[in-house]
Amino acid sequence: MSSNTHHLLEDAQSRMADIYEWLEVADDSRHRLGQPKRIHQASLSVRMDDGSLRVFPAWRVQYDDTRGPTKGGIRFHPDVTEDEVATLSFWMTLKCAAVDLPFGGAKGGICVDPKTLSRMELERLSRSYIRAFHDVIGPERDIPAPDVNTNAIIMGWMVDEYAQIERRHVPGVITGKPLGLGGSIGREQATGAGALQVLDMWVKRQHQEPGDLRVAIQGFGNAGQHFARLAHDAGYNIVALSDSQGAIYSEEGLDPAPILRHKNRTRELKGMVYCDDSVCDAAQTQPLSGDDLLELDVDVLVLAALENQITDANADRVRAGAIVEIANGPVSTGGDRVLQDRNIPVIPDIIANAGGVIVSHLEWVQNRMGDYWSGEAVEKQLRRRLEREANACFNLAEEKAIPLRTAAYIQGVGRIVDAMAQQGTQGYFNGHHG
């Protein structure tokens, strides 16, 4: 088990004690939110291209469905564990409530290094996952989506496998699909675009301008790539980028577009040069380690990789003026405390990266109604919901003089426990209406 995921749920749950101090929460609700509602595990047997058989551990965890069918991505990663998937499902529960979506939270994962598989092996594995968990997912029960190392193509294989088992088209069972299979315009860039919108709102509140801010981005996957590109176009000065292979830094700033083209050719950022077709110009960049990037003196540090990147072991070395969490849980509870003591604000994941699940909800709605919207219509609804919910979080933090994460949790947990209370609590059944 990865050290980054060991006892991850326990660490995530430890934040709830502070939240309960701000809310009147019945013991019933505390018990229900203290553990996942369902944990499903399977062993996926896949025939490899060389004829051998490999078995991959896989999970689907449905944390809470009080406010609606559960929702959450599926990640393929060699360090995936049950504890990690359960924790991610907990965060999804809070995230959906924090932005007022009619969903509960879920998550899925397969313990695999997808970079070692051929495309045909990857397809067999993806379809095997749906065969294993077909009975516990569905458009009114649990709706998967892409996550780390999964994408629209993989979702397309999965929705097709579900349709073959059902013997009917059920596009609403999975979101993040290719457009031709019922996907939504805007879904692929939604997480990065939403994170930039939230950052823009926060920057405006600080009476700052994007062009004056130096930004370092850890993680150059789907969300990080789109955020970097859009932030650069919006005038932010991107000075550092990293992926799992390495990091690069330029005091003068980086253009993410040619970097992405280079990464797609070489799968790494090391030795980065700016290349456009046959014309290549050496960029004034220097390589960094991933740890070095986290400790750069920048205005904004964007965490778009994996969980527990900043902990109590390294938070005292962070020199960023503010942190944006695009990844799920990149700052541990201990790291949070250190950053709070140092007055470094953290824009929390359940608000900052909610753009993906918001557009997933829009995709689900389009699938269910059998009609599809323009990119402008999707973007308008995304921006409207994020503006409303992020501003509510920011306002609450200012009003109560509390960290942004605490405000976001109060916003999400408050909605969940209100829904639970409407089902009846101990106080109600004892005649006290509590």
Image (cartoon, helix red, strand yellow):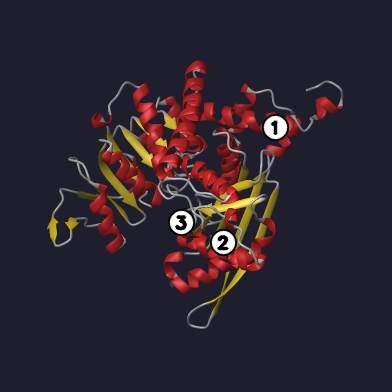
Cα separation between marks 1 and 3: 34 Å
Is residue 274 among the parts visible in the rendering?
yes
Q: Is residue 109 left or right of residue 247?
A: right
- Residue 232, compared with residue 147, is above or below; it is above
Dot 3 amino acid type: Leu
Q: Position of residue 109 (x, y in %)?
A: 56, 57
Cα separation between marks 2 and 1: 31 Å
Q: SS class of the residue under badge 3?
A: helix
Q: Earlier in the sequence, mark 3 or mark 2?
A: 2
Q: Is residue 165 left or right of residue 12?
A: right
Residue closer to the observer: 240 or 411: 411
Q: Pick the quarter of the image with the C terminus.
A: top right
Find residue 342 and report its image quarter. Answer: top left
Dot 2 amino acid type: Val
In the rendered image, the residue lying farthest to the bottom is: 51
* Circle 1 or circle 3, nearest the eye: 3
Q: What residue did someone put label 3 on?
A: 179
Q: Earlier in the sequence, mark 2 or mark 1?
A: 2
- Tag 3 near tag 2, CB within 8 Å: no
Q: What residue did someone put label 1 on?
A: 419
Q: Which mark is residue 159?
A: 2
What residue is at 54 percent from the left and 34 percent from the top? 99
What residue is at 46 percent from the left and 56 percent from the top? 179
Dot 1 amino acid type: Ala
Q: Residues within 10 Å of mark 3 (few under 14, many from 20)?
A: some
* Circle 2 or circle 1, nearest the eye: 2
